[in-house]
Image (tube, helix red, strand yellow):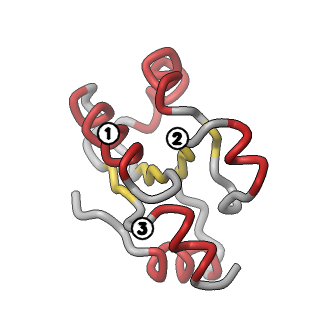
Amino acid sequence: MADITTSELRQRLQAGETPHLIDVREPWEHEEGRIPTAQNIPLSSLPDKLDDLDDWKDEEVIVHCKSGSRSSQAKAFLTQQGFSNVRNLLGGFTEYSASGN
């Protein structure tokens, strides 16, 4: 699945959509700033949370981190685990927050 831009995500959130959004940053990063509705699951904890995410396997899941590196790894991992529609937020939270909250 193609990755998602910050402008596309922002438009969808403003339209009232609530996509499955996973923030793979550390909890302290999530506390400093977050995207509305994002569930914080640090990249290192993702393997332990797979059972909790099982219902999302065939649904769109958007992953993000600070800049896109960790979320790219999360996307690859989730895809390997059978998730069929995982998208990485290009530019991560840094670009999202710079584009206006």
Residue at x 22%, y 57% (from the top left corner): 1
Up-down relation of residue 55 to residue 95 (above or below) = above
Mark number displayed over residue 91: 3
Mark 3: amino acid: Gly
Q: Mark 1 vs mark 2: which is more N-terminal?
A: 2
Q: Are marks 3 and 1 in contact (CB under 8 Å)?
A: no
Quarter of the image for residue 77 reads top left
Distance Cα–Cα, label 3 vs label 1: 14 Å
Q: Are marks 3 and 2 in contact (CB under 8 Å)?
A: no
**Closest to the observer: 97 or 86?**
97
Residue at x 36%, y 35% (from the top left corner): 57
Distance Cα–Cα, label 1 vs label 2: 10 Å
Q: Mark 3 vs mark 1: which is more N-terminal?
A: 1
Dot 1 alpha-carbon crowd within 10 angstroms: few under 14, some 14 to 19, many 20 or more: some
Q: Are marks 1 and 2 in contact (CB under 8 Å)?
A: yes
**Closest to the observer: 80 or 17?**
80
Up-down relation of residue 41 to residue 20 (above or below) = above
Q: Which residue is mark 1?
A: 73
Mark 2: amino acid: Val
Distance Cα–Cα, label 3 vs label 2: 14 Å
| Tag 3 secondary structure | loop
| Tag 1 secondary structure | helix
Quarter of the image for residue 41 reads top right
Q: Which residue is mark 2?
A: 24
Question: Which quadrant would the C terminus be assigned to in this image?
Answer: bottom right
